[in-house]
Image (tube, rainbow, N blue to C red):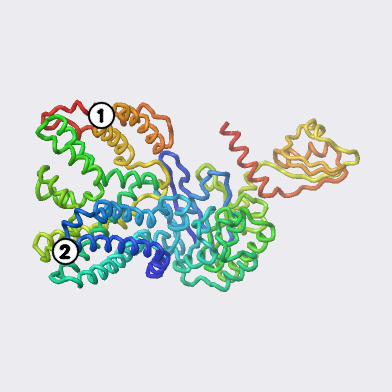
Amino acid sequence: MIEIKGLSHSFGKHVVLQDVDLTVESGKVLGLVGINGAGKSTLFRLMTGIYKPQQGEVFYDGKSPLIDTTRQDIFLLPDDPYFTAQTTTKSMFKLYKTFYPNANKAVYNEIISYFGLDEKKPLRSFSKGMRRQAYIAIAFAIAPKYLLLDEAFDGLDPLARKMFKERIRKHVTENNATVIISSHALLELEEFCDDYVMIDEKHVVASGSALEERVNMCRYQMAFVETPNEAMFTAAGLKVVNLKITGRFVVGVFDGSKEEVLPKLQSLGPAVMDEIALNFEEAFIESLDKRIRRVE
Amino acid sequence: MVNYYKYRISKSIPTMIVTIVFGLLMGLSTFITRLGGYYDSKRFPIVSLDAFSVLFFIEAFALAYLEFSSFRNKRNLDTWFSFPLSREKIAMVHMANVFTIYAVQTFVFSILGMALMSLYSGFNYLYFIVAMFAMMIYYFLVFCFISATFLFGNSVQDGALSVIGWINLPSAITSAYYMILSYADEEYYLFRSESVSLSVNAPINSLITKLEYLINERNYKAYVKYVKAHQDYFYDRYFDADLSTGKIVSICVWAVLLIVAAIALPKLFSSRPTEKIAGVSDFFLCFDFLIPFYTLFFIAVTQESIVLKLFFIPTAYVAYCYYRKSPKITIKRFIVLIVLFVIACIPFLDILGISNSYIF
């Protein structure tokens, strides 16, 4: 289990994280979201001992990551991992093997072969996605109890993403591992993660379904007898967040509670109308948009 | 830790080969020169010992750069510092790696020296072995000193500036002082050439050696004489063939300093906050001090050329902007800069009642 208690960190006068509390149970995949500069990477660095917390503590099963033996169970895959001009996938494994003696070469080779990476070619000659694939292979070869993935899906093609997600799920199930993934691919996180948290304004502001609950928005799909247009929705007093019109079919996201929106939509006389749950991305955007507008 | 050490050694083989070749070249040239006869060698100098000492300084700096520069790059630190090995242990491994390089280099160098010596009679091999050992710890000490200076900077550029600036600082102060002295008073005219020599040979006379000497005798004239003698310090003494108390004391001083450095360097390495790496240096004695100081130094030592003097001011401003990472200088920073410039002037001030008008 990962426990974060009262974690705060600043860069000079700029406070990045303040009083962050978070608990992640073992055997879970947690999504970590937030806008650029929200503090996701800083949180990862604090969680892995790269930064020493100015305030608060992080524990992995009661042990601090500032102790090097604790980090034997933790693997951070950074957004931009280290490699030199001469590093090949083969030499990279050799480096990681010195720090993680239990790293499994067979697993590594299997993933490298799956992705079709040439182990003799230098990493600098690879595309960003291919480099990511090489580091994914390292991560699963080490098979740590705690896997922290920063910008996890960045640069990966759909096939690689599929394989990556399957491997993560298998790793969690087989080893009761804990995985934390930060990504901007919110829809992907929503379908894949057991839970997710959002970092905004220096805090973990929403966790899991609480994010949807704090968003005052609803989504409907409708069919009309006559071809509809956007003007009729605004004329009905609806605040349109998003509207997709395909012939006589409409899927729309509207600002306001169900009680406010539903009567206005009914006044437009749709032939059929159903409420659909908001997805994570919409909730995320709405939540941040409101906060930013409030600040402005 | 052991695994990482083995990994580092395996990665350092090309470096080791280069240092061995360099050591052998130096050894061959030195021994051939010396064994050919001291006076002959002066007449037909095959190699310049000054140059080789400079190369040893460069070697120490190159090794410090190779071992620690990847830790001055922010991108790398997410990987390095999340590894399950403490920062102190990482630094210790890198130091052990360099010590191994020096040990191998010195060993090969010694074998060559012994082989050449065996062709002649009358050499004290015990002294030679002790001298080789002393040389090894001396150069490793220089490496530790350079590494520490390098690690005070938040970036490779900061580190390089600190190394070059601080290693040369005592020589710069002394040579500028003599330069001013010689211009101010004919009696001191001879010091002028010594001051140039001090500037040129600055790396030879590292801070460590200076301190060691100056602690014993605060006499600048004697210091200049010492500088002359020091250039051949390691090499000519093979012919002395004795282990005097003074030499033993020197070796002990180096050894003690080395132990202190071996403990302090990993602590310094781990104490630098990761957040500050790749940022503007926050070390007061880095560019904030060194740029005004050396601007003043260069103005002081280029007395004949007003054009050069005028060239240093804009150059210093460009260098300052480079290190500051901004062309803007706020009023607060401008005041700090003026204060630092005044502080940097202190070594050049007229402390003996002699005119310092040549500075400005």
Which structural element holds mark 1?
Answer: loop
Report which residue position mark 2 lands on: B238
Task: Output the chain of dot 1.
Answer: B
Q: Earlier in the sequence, mark 2 or mark 1?
A: 2
Q: Is residue A184 left or right of residue B87?
A: right
Residue A269: x and y, percent?
Answer: 86, 39
Locate residue A230 relative to residue A198 in the image: left or right.
right
Image spot of residue A107 (x, y percent): 58, 71
Please tell me which residue is depicted at 36% across the width and 54% down the height of the picture: B62
Q: Which structural element holds mark 2?
A: helix
User: Residue drawn 24% across and 68% down?
Assistant: B113
Q: Position of residue B9 (x, y in %)?
A: 39, 67
* Image position of A257 (left or right of B80): right
Do badges 2 and 1 share one subunit?
A: yes
Task: Relative to B143, say whether B4 is above or below.
Answer: below
Task: Report the number of numbered marks.
Answer: 2
Regarding residue A4, the answer to whether it shows in the image is no
Mark 1: amino acid: Glu
Q: Residues within 10 Å of mark 1 (few under 14, many from 20)?
A: few
Is residue B132 visible in the rendered structure shown here? yes
- Find disc 1 in the rendering and name its residue: B304
Q: Tag 2: residue type?
A: Tyr
Q: Residues within 10 Å of mark 2 (few under 14, many from 20)?
A: some
> On what subunit does the disc labeled 2 rest?
B
Q: Position of residue A267 (x, y in %)?
A: 83, 36
The image quadrant where one finds the C terminus of chain A is: top right
Looking at the image, the residue that sits furthest to the right is: A225
